Each structure stands twice: as C-alpha cells, then as structure tokens.
Image: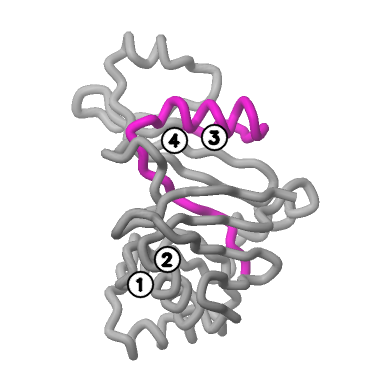
Amino acid sequence: MHLFHYHLVTSKVREVEARYVGKLGFDLIGRHGRIGEEVTSFESGHGWQELDRLGFKLRLTELERGAVNVVVQPGQWELPRVDHLGFALDEDEFIETLARAEVRELRIQEHGGRRTFVSTNAGYRLELHPPREWLDELLEKESVLRLAELHLRADDPELKASALGELLAAPYTNETVEIGDAVVRFVPDGPQGRPQLHAELFI
C-alpha cells in the first residue's frame, strides 16, 4: 500500500504551483481547464501570461516528482486544504478496503473504471487504485523521491486519523496513520471539514 497522491484546493493556485516547481523541484505535468466551452490542457512551456491572454480558465494543475503526484485545484481557501488522498493498493487490499467501506455505509464513487473514490465521513475522501501499469511505473520512481510524512491540520485529529486507519486497516494512533513507509499526521487547531496542508517531508 502506497500513498502517492494528494489533491489540494486553494485560492492561491499559482503561488502553490510555483512552490512545488520552484522550491521542491516538481515537474509541471499539465494545466487542465477550458477556453470558452472547449476543454483543453497545456503542458509545461506555456506561461500564465500566455494562458491569460487566451482566456484559459483553470480546472486543475498536475505536478509530479519521483513517486509523488500532487494536484492543485482552484477553491475558496487561501491555505491549501486536502480534498482527497490517493493510494495504490494490491488487488486484495483494494477489495478489502471497499468491503470495509460498504460495511460502514460510506459513499463509493467510480469514475470511468479508472478511479474509485471513498468518502471517510471525516471531511476528506480517499482515491483508491488497484494495480495499474502507469501506477507501477510511477512507484518505480521511489528511489528518486517519495513522500515520507504528510502533516494535515484538522479540527479533530483523532477522528480523522481513526477514519483513515480503520478504512485502510493501517496502524494508527490518536494522530498518526502508518501507510507503508509513509506517515500521515493530523495536527490540532485546524479547520472543520477538509484538513489543511501543514507540512510535507520528502526523501
């Protein structure tokens, strides 16, 4: 089981994007959105000045480095909040996690057979992936960079940690969840609902 992805929502998309690219060395995979009614995407090499001139309206920015994938989406919060965490599971882990979600009567959404989202009823969702070729290729890049710790500020760390730990059947405490080689830590004094990005440790 691997934590390889997280999806952030912020009103400061350009600043957050610049941090990942400029300070953390992530690659810009693409910016996805619309020009008028036409859905379109731009890879790196197209600056914001050019996109503004074209009337481009951003839906999300995708960034990647090593075995870590980050998506940034426009939203109402200045400090980024997490909409969902993405996990790569083996076939058994995937089936068992969905079974636990069904027992808990959690909302499960399948998107075109490519992604499965599960609500935690704790303010954020999980994006679950069984084995896939593209995901195997991404995880092979762990030697380049991987996520060791993700710290999220939350109103109720214990609730958010237990929701994640129980759904994934992963070891957890009142504030931490161990997922493979990574740790998700929920820290106090955060907002209600979606947890706020507080810190990351990459190795």
Residue that mark 4 sits on:
61
Tell me, yes or no, whether the two marked residues, 3 and 2, touch with CB atoms within 8 Å: no
Q: Give the CA distance from mark 1 to mark 2.
A: 7 Å
Mark 3 and mark 2 lie on one chain; the one further toward the N terminus is 3
Q: Nearer the viewer, mark 1 or mark 2?
A: 1
| Mark 3 or mark 4: whose residue is earlier in sequence | 3
| Residue at figure coordinates x 61%, y 33% from the top left | 27
**Circle number at residue 29:** 3
- Give the residue drawn at x 35%, y 35%: 78
Q: Secondary structure at mark 2?
A: strand
Count of residue discs: 4
Residue type at mark 3? Ile
Q: Are marks 2 and 4 in contact (CB under 8 Å)?
A: no
Give the residue furthest to the right. Answer: 143
- The residue tagged 2 is 126
Start-end of magenta stretch = 1-30
- Which image quarter holds the N terminus? bottom right
Q: Earlier in the sequence, mark 1 or mark 2?
A: 1
Q: Amino acid at mark 1?
A: Thr
Rendered location of residue 136, percent (x, y): 66, 60
- CA neighbours of label 4 inside 10 A, class few (<14), some (14 to 19), many (20+): many
Q: Residues within 10 Å of mark 1 (few under 14, many from 20)?
A: many
Label 1 belongs to which residue? 120
Q: Position of residue 95 (x, y in %)?
A: 48, 83
Asked if marks 1 and 2 touch (Cβ < 8 Å), the reply is: yes
Query: Which structural element holds mark 4?
Result: strand
Q: Earlier in the sequence, mark 2 or mark 4?
A: 4
Please tell me whether residue 157 is drawn above or below residue 69 in the rendered image.
below
Q: Residue at x 37, y 82 (%)?
A: 101
Kind of residue indicated by mark 2: Leu
Question: Mark 3 or 2, which is nearer the eye?
Answer: 2
